[in-house]
Image: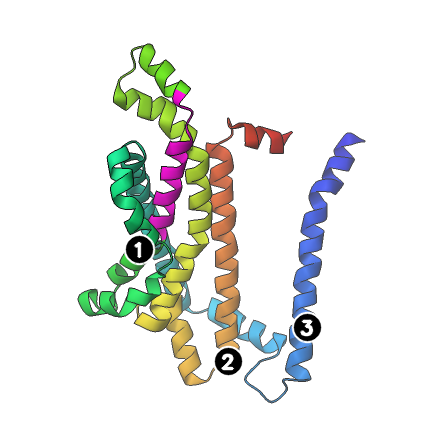
Amino acid sequence: MMTAQRWRHSARPTAYGVIGVLGLLLVWQWLAVGPLSGTSLPTVAEAIGALVQMLGEGGFWEDTSVTAGTALIGLAASIVVGVVLGILIGTSQLLRFATSAVLEFLKPIPPIVILPIVVLVLGPTTEMTIVLVIIGCAIPILIQTVAGVFDVDPVRTDTARSYGMGRAEILGRVVLPGASPFIATAIRVSAPAALVVTVVAGLLGGGPGLGQSLYQAQTAGDSARMYALIIVLGVLGMVFQAASQLVEAKALHWHESKREVQA
């Protein structure tokens, strides 16, 4: 009885999600054949037909792998940069005071604003896209890491120090675990953001991948292919989000917040 109730409880969000997708498709079809008939908006069947055609093209899979790979590389580099610098700044009052104004200045600036500068320096390349992803994702991860380090209870570090732990051991066994929920949240938010920056870099900066394919479809007036690519990007974004949530759940299975969710 309990198993059946759990199954119904877990299946309910999925069912609601399917209903939401079907509702969106119905609205899309109604707009395409009704109020927006004669515009560039394709019907659902036309977009799905273009999607099926793309799935048989080798270039599509190459562009998809380039986009996903570039976003992952940029995200991984952002995590390394953000966490390392965040720990250094968070554990040093001098660095925290010296960098607070700089971080507050950089925080609201979107990476696309400096896209022309990066394109001039690196050209429309994969490296250009990776740099933009790092600029867009490393700062939020850094800021959250600093907040996480600052949130660690000083009593814990003092206790660890009284037991003879060195600075490196305290960082690894006290500070980093204490800050990890903040870091995990930043990574979960940054994962889809890395994909967005990668696509926009291709769309506006000429970088390789699905963004460039989207630009080419738009330029050619192939609206069905353009919307098919948008569907692919939406699915890819969902995969990135689900993967980041899974990694967070596995990495923080010991944390009380995750135990409460599992219970």
- In the rendered image, the quadrant that contains the N terminus is top right
Q: Is residue 103 left or right of residue 46?
A: left
Q: Is residue 47 left or right of residue 183?
A: right
Residue at (77% x, 36% y) in the render: 4
Q: Nearer the viewer, residue 43 or 189?
A: 189
Q: Which mark is residue 103?
A: none
Q: Is residue 65 left or right of residue 92?
A: right
Q: Which residue is mark 1?
A: 135
Mark 2 to mark 3 CA distance (whole Å):
18 Å
Residue at (31% x, 53% y) in the render: 134
Q: Which residue is mark 3?
A: 27
Could you classify mark 1 by the number of other residues whose Cα lies within 10 Å: few (under 14), some (14-19), or many (20 or more)? many
Figure quadrant of residue 167: top left
Residue at (71% x, 52% y) in the render: 15
Mark 2 to mark 1 CA distance (whole Å):
32 Å
Which amino acid, mark 2? Ser
Segment tinted magenta in the rendering:
137-154
**Helix, strand or loop: magenta stretch:** helix
Q: Nearer the viewer, mark 2 or mark 3?
A: 3
Q: Which residue is mark 2?
A: 223
Q: Which tag, 3 or 1, sits closer to the chain's start?
A: 3
Which amino acid, mark 3? Val
Decide if residue 73 is in sight here. no
